[in-house]
Image (tube, rainbow, N blue to C red):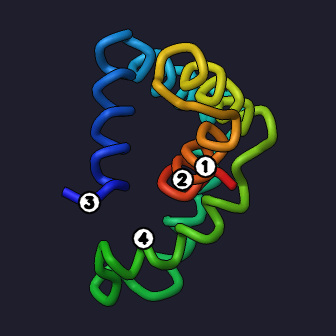
Amino acid sequence: MNKDAQMRAAINQKLIETGERECLKELLRAKLIECGWKDQLKSHCKEVIKEKGLEHVTVDDLVAEITPKGRALVPDSVKELLQRIRTFLLQHADFKTELDCCFVVLFLKVKLAIN
């Protein structure tokens, strides 16, 4: 297991142990619904399917089509989760510096596609 995979596993384990993972997931889900993100993407999916025809669209095609729009539509209010993750990491993980923590948050931004 490489260093990134080890770090991800350690962070995930700590998030699970403390219950913070479920809290973050619920907060993210609620904020995305509240701001209309889910409805906007659902509508976009319907448009893509209508435009291309149901028989000509695969799940992979649909994901490729809506992913850029989905990322662009994530509002700032949802991005506050990154600050919450940074705070969690500083309190619970063995990071030597704020820079280490920032690296992990940047890594999570890429993985969560909240950038």
Q: Residue furthest left?
A: 1
Q: Residue furthest right?
A: 76
Above or below for 111 versus 55 = above
Disc 2/disc 4 C-alpha distance (Å): 22 Å
Tag 4 residue: 63
Q: Secondary structure at mark 3?
A: loop
- The amino acid marked with disc number 4 is Val
Disc on the earlier residue, 3 or 4:
3
Give the camera-side residue of 34 and 84. Answer: 84
Disc 2/disc 1 C-alpha distance (Å): 6 Å
Disc 4/disc 1 C-alpha distance (Å): 28 Å
Give the residue at x 55% y 58%: 110
Q: Secondary structure at mark 1?
A: helix
- The amino acid marked with disc number 1 is Phe
Cβ–Cβ under 8 Å for marks 3 and 2 = no
Tag 3 residue: 2
Q: Quadrant of residue 60?
A: bottom left
Numbered tag placed on residue 103 in the rendering: 1
Cβ–Cβ under 8 Å for marks 2 and 1 = yes
Above or below for 5 versus 12 = below
